[in-house]
Image (spheres, coloured by chain):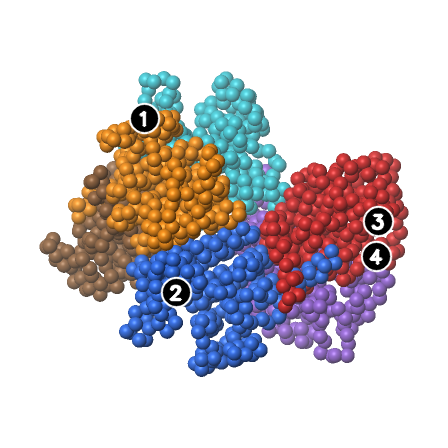
Chain colours: A cyan, B brown, C orange, D blue, E red, F purple
Amino acid sequence: MEEFQQRAQVLIEAIPYIRSFHGKTFVIKYGGNAMINPEIKKAVMLDIILLKYLGLNPVIVHGGGPEISEMLKRVGVKSTFYQGLRVTDADTVEIVNMVLAGKINKELVTMINQFGGKAVGLSGQDSQLLVARKKQLDNDQVDLGFVGEVVAIKPELLHFLIEKSYIPVVATIGVGADGEFYNINADTVAGELAAALKAEKLIILTDTEGIYADPQDQSSLLSMINIEQARTMIHSGQIEGGMVPKVEACIYALQHGVSRTHIIDGRRFHTLLLEVLTDQGIGTMVVE
Amino acid sequence: MEEFQQRAQVLIEAIPYIRSFHGKTFVIKYGGNAMINPEIKKAVMLDIILLKYLGLNPVIVHGGGPEISEMLKRVGVKSTFYQGLRVTDADTVEIVNMVLAGKINKELVTMINQFGGKAVGLSGQDSQLLVARKKQLDNDQVDLGFVGEVVAIKPELLHFLIEKSYIPVVATIGVGADGEFYNINADTVAGELAAALKAEKLIILTDTEGIYADPQDQSSLLSMINIEQARTMIHSGQIEGGMVPKVEACIYALQHGVSRTHIIDGRRFHTLLLEVLTDQGIGTMVVE
Amino acid sequence: MEEFQQRAQVLIEAIPYIRSFHGKTFVIKYGGNAMINPEIKKAVMLDIILLKYLGLNPVIVHGGGPEISEMLKRVGVKSTFYQGLRVTDADTVEIVNMVLAGKINKELVTMINQFGGKAVGLSGQDSQLLVARKKQLDNDQVDLGFVGEVVAIKPELLHFLIEKSYIPVVATIGVGADGEFYNINADTVAGELAAALKAEKLIILTDTEGIYADPQDQSSLLSMINIEQARTMIHSGQIEGGMVPKVEACIYALQHGVSRTHIIDGRRFHTLLLEVLTDQGIGTMVVE
Amino acid sequence: MEEFQQRAQVLIEAIPYIRSFHGKTFVIKYGGNAMINPEIKKAVMLDIILLKYLGLNPVIVHGGGPEISEMLKRVGVKSTFYQGLRVTDADTVEIVNMVLAGKINKELVTMINQFGGKAVGLSGQDSQLLVARKKQLDNDQVDLGFVGEVVAIKPELLHFLIEKSYIPVVATIGVGADGEFYNINADTVAGELAAALKAEKLIILTDTEGIYADPQDQSSLLSMINIEQARTMIHSGQIEGGMVPKVEACIYALQHGVSRTHIIDGRRFHTLLLEVLTDQGIGTMVVE
Amino acid sequence: MEEFQQRAQVLIEAIPYIRSFHGKTFVIKYGGNAMINPEIKKAVMLDIILLKYLGLNPVIVHGGGPEISEMLKRVGVKSTFYQGLRVTDADTVEIVNMVLAGKINKELVTMINQFGGKAVGLSGQDSQLLVARKKQLDNDQVDLGFVGEVVAIKPELLHFLIEKSYIPVVATIGVGADGEFYNINADTVAGELAAALKAEKLIILTDTEGIYADPQDQSSLLSMINIEQARTMIHSGQIEGGMVPKVEACIYALQHGVSRTHIIDGRRFHTLLLEVLTDQGIGTMVVE
Amino acid sequence: MEEFQQRAQVLIEAIPYIRSFHGKTFVIKYGGNAMINPEIKKAVMLDIILLKYLGLNPVIVHGGGPEISEMLKRVGVKSTFYQGLRVTDADTVEIVNMVLAGKINKELVTMINQFGGKAVGLSGQDSQLLVARKKQLDNDQVDLGFVGEVVAIKPELLHFLIEKSYIPVVATIGVGADGEFYNINADTVAGELAAALKAEKLIILTDTEGIYADPQDQSSLLSMINIEQARTMIHSGQIEGGMVPKVEACIYALQHGVSRTHIIDGRRFHTLLLEVLTDQGIGTMVVE
């Protein structure tokens, strides 16, 4: 019992956070390598269920990563890359869509429902949530195929599901005016969605601790950077690779009315709760 | 203009039907070979959009058929069959789920949205719409794997979506208490769903004209049969193959409060409108 | 069946119009000679019922014309006219009111209800829908009696009936602050009502094809004129007689937020549907 | 001020009645000779407005009487009578309808609106409020023409209007399945409507003090009679003429769930308030 | 009956007031010596109940006065005064709170409920209705203890209760950020509350007839003064003592959107009704 | 961080309880000696706030005990007792009411509001929540004065406050038909209220660990007893004193539809959370 009493303290101390976040929307990007460990995946889903019961409104945006590659391999589709972006032909986008919207999405939904939440899986086609178009590179000579960018968000369905106590889980396939499907970067969608929903926070769970001043030096984790610093670091290459769209999503969200954005470690247990329900700073907060 | 005036007549004559079906739910099973012709597929979606605008509440239940087989072939999964049922191992159900929930479902949703409706795609995992379990054969020695049967329907989400003017599109993957996915016959799901939603009608679009007294004789189409006759015909083998679950779905729906059930030809244009908005009997009506 | 399939096409092609007009209000002026043919009258009512079922919100404004004259004759009241306006003494306005609010209004309501709609008849007295005052002529020496003009519209009751799925049918009797009844031109009321309801369209059904460049030349029908042209034509006398208040009602509506105004032929079948549900221009559209 | 203080007492003493009748419906029949004196008519309307402001829901049912006869005379229609009922041919019913729905109804509505209430006038055609059929006499050889009886009441519209704070004013013209109009006795309609609305009270304002034990003896006013006594008195002829349908309306209402029914003097000021807001019995109460 | 008819007139004449005040909020300050006479207290409560039934929304703010002094005496707490303000130590504020929130408040609530209304008693602690802080005198050297001033009003709970037909009764204890209780002048609270609720009127019932030009001369009652005059009179001492916070409450309310403010005699019967429901000016109206 | 992760586990494990208790009402009796320690009092309030944020609906019923005695002493009122019940004269009930409704109630409300909840304090007078009458002893010769028993609960106000996210705090003063105040045992009120609200649980926080088989033997704590056992123990005197009304409240609640009743130790931290959010049995559960 004493142990319980000590532990209950964590809840009691969270009251001010619970109170101030009551009824607010939190867009949580979850995906890629942070999604590999099944124990952690379960813990993340439980954290999200708990946030919902505490009166917050989490919206999950997920990517796919490894499972897409694996399925492409199984059906024998080979990918070429241009500047780190997968050239996505019709065959590829069909597989990407099936893996994201048909497999990963439904697995996350199933986990949430199994552990006590009420989730609904959506992808950008549903109620035209994500209207997309072909992403244009500056260099016109490379055709990335069905790699898309967001033209418009139609969040009505999300608002309605949130109000009815569901946890929406969003696969980041967009749909063009022509009915074509486009694969869109999940970090980018998370930033756009946070903006469209006027979210309180955008939280990106990833497979590092956050942003490092020096990527080689794990002791150089930055607890906070502002937009200007972030841009300088992207320009200088200090922020690079998959971290770039994450930081850009944070910047976009901040510039469109989201109060706080965070890049935190999705490989450790309950970092999401720690971020939301305590004053312990973890990961990197990107601020205006 | 004169032509228009003549044509407008079709609308005017439909008023009594529109009136009496206002706000009622119609479960429409669409799938298999009836889904192959893209022109017809578009016409079916347009009919459904129109019914929605006329104040009726269509709910689409779809199967997969040919596309599943094709994808299984692409990934090199071979199927064995037992009494016409595909033995569905873990690999197979993963593919089935991806094709149904990730591909066909989202394609139907996209078509509806593109042509002027507002659709949301769901599969049985979403909000635990279809709670399933492993289907037990009488003969215990054959294990069909992840072939499922419905344990419970949780239609709350469908009610919400209908009320908010969405057209729900349902992929027939069920989810077990253990979180496993099960492939369930789409006709069966349509019957169960019609019952759970207390639908006005269950309409099964298929690739024949309806039920024939003599399957070999196309002039023997039956415009109406009752439950008893239907059972006799199943027993005698007059109704056989894929028609059996269709007829059984009708019987189940009728016995659980659905007013009318119809098996109609999904290969011809606007048979759905013809069935709902006129007094011209088409296909076979199964009655109590 | 083939015939039906062809005809169904008319509905399918109407989907974009149904969609974009969903929930919008349409003020439809119907009266005078366009109302004489009982077959056409029935067809107009059916068109209106259908528009309602398609999710549009028609509001009918009607005049009286021939039936008023006939009743005045029956009770032996003689009318004098000044500049085309009936000098309306107390006896006359009593008859006008009875014929409009008690006879024509209730007959239209009855037809709509009989053919499958849900109509409620109102006149300007109800919930003070049309607050009126004595119409002042520039020339003070002629007293038109109880000929009125609109002082204020109180549309609350209409909004409420529309929301509850009723089709309001409005007789154009206004009521003064003193409780006196005033006869108001029905075209004028239709224009004011369209403005007050922020209607999508004002459609005036009349007994010509529309506005002619040369009233003597039936081939000179104008498919569109703007406000400036309309004013010039009124000034020059090209638009004259009963067409003047119709055009002025259109101008008033356009200047108070109504998107489109149309003067169309009410003597032919289904011109209303043709105007609303197709892109075939009929009659004359008056635009800003 | 002292005078006011004394008078305010009447309000204070009414509180228990106001409280217990809050939100309850009162069907008030008003018509015939009780309607002739304009000062009294105004006072009755004011009483009704006040009851509405006090939270009660009055519904007015009115007849026509003298004004119908006068208009029939003006248009030269002669009436024959059979057993006190006017034989009503097509011409007659047209006039009756116009006078009731177009004149008297709108005049009452106008008075209420002018004195501070919010009234809407309806007749049986509106939203099919009063579905009627030809009244059958036992003696088949006499055809009363368009004299009707109630087949069904559709009170939905009344409920809506009451809820939105309107005072409904009902003219007693019924509409047949064939669209024909029928003149129905206003007392009868009041009784049916009270039953359909599950009214708290049916109050019939008339031009006598109530029911007399001996119609010749004004001192024999009965303050209360039960259904059995009422029937005996009708049978014996003690209750006769226009009082018969009044008493039968009370009986009908009582037998269909109305709590109290009253026949009171409509020729004196504020008898309505006196009946509803005090414990002073006036007129005759008919009880089960 | 004739007497009743005369009296009913008072109600009828009140209709325009009832109509224009429908759904409006009236903050009524009641307290001190005006509360002593139990017959008057009952009459005031009845007036308030009646206003509620007539569709107005009274909110009662009460003080304590004599009963506080009596209880302080019983428990042997002695008070010192500074400039007419009671120096309020911890012991004193505890007693003040108990008498106001526990005794007087619940007695008023009980009377209202007993006589036919539905009251709920609140004090400033409830839902943090009155957020307070220590009142600062210009002269820092005197510590008044727990005498408070309003920092913020949180009227959400009042809005809810009003909407649900309750009459809120408010005791004027405020609560500090530190959880301490503060005694706040009831007139001041009434003014602040009227402002926060955007009340139609603030009515202060007191134990004089209103404001006198010359306090010594009872014939010098002022029926109306404006803010500027009021300030001059406070400055000159013509308005003094307990009348000062009353007038200041009126000024505050007027400057924050309240339409009318009145100081009237609470020692006479039904002055509240007289003020609200007639055009007889009583007491003093303070205007902008 | 590791410590947090461990602690977060307590929340995660609570999800099934949070889920199944979502939207359910919990009546929590708190009072007497369990209320003395200010640290514990704060902890109890925090537990209750947390339960509210977790979606449960706590309703607090409190007694007074020591503070009442102290105030009676201060004002010099002496109490006599009969069979453990305080003989409560008019002076006494006045003090009891002030202490309960004016002091303790408002202090609990203030604490909850200060620590992040939204509380409203009520006593039985508010909206006639607790209708009471004089408690009759079997022995007629002793007059206990204003000691009351519950005649009726009017829970409408509580339902409404709960729905609007408030935590109601109830002081157990009842009000008689005559407007008199009665002191009612707080355990008894808690049981009646739990029944009237159809609560999920009644939890009585007290100053022992629960019910002992042998009150002298602290190791004899009973984790569960049924109604029959409880009655036997009361009869035999094993349950005695202040525990009797607690157990009787549990029995009453169980017999009127409350699912579970618990008597737990209110002197230790977070026992309330432990009881509600874990499967660790604490205290004594009384079951049917």
Mark 1: which secondary structure? loop
**Which quadrant is the C terminus of chain B positioned in?**
bottom left
Q: Are marks 2 and 3 on the same chain?
A: no
**Which quadrant is the N terminus of chain B positioned in?**
top left
Query: Which residue bears the numbered disc 2?
Result: D184
Q: Is residue F220 left or right of residue E81?
A: left
Mark 3: which secondary structure? helix
Using the image, tell me which numbered label, if any, was put on residue A145. 1
* Amino acid tagged 1: Gly
Q: Chain of mark 3?
A: E
Residues marked 2 and 3 touching at CB (< 8 Å): no
Distance (Cα) linking label 1 and label 3: 93 Å
Q: Chain of mark 4?
A: E
Q: What's the residue at 63%, 61% (across, down)? A: E8
Distance (Cα) linking label 2 and label 4: 71 Å
**Dot 4, crowdedness within 10 Å: few (<14), some or many (≥20)?**
some
Note whether residue A147 is visible. no
Using the image, tell me which numbered label, if any, was put on residue E218. 3
Residues marked 2 and 1 touching at CB (< 8 Å): no
Distance (Cα) linking label 2 and label 3: 66 Å
Distance (Cα) linking label 1 and label 4: 85 Å
**Dot 1, crowdedness within 10 Å: few (<14), some or many (≥20)?**
some
Using the image, tell me which numbered label, if any, was put on residue A160. none
Query: Which residue bears the numbered disc 4?
Result: E71
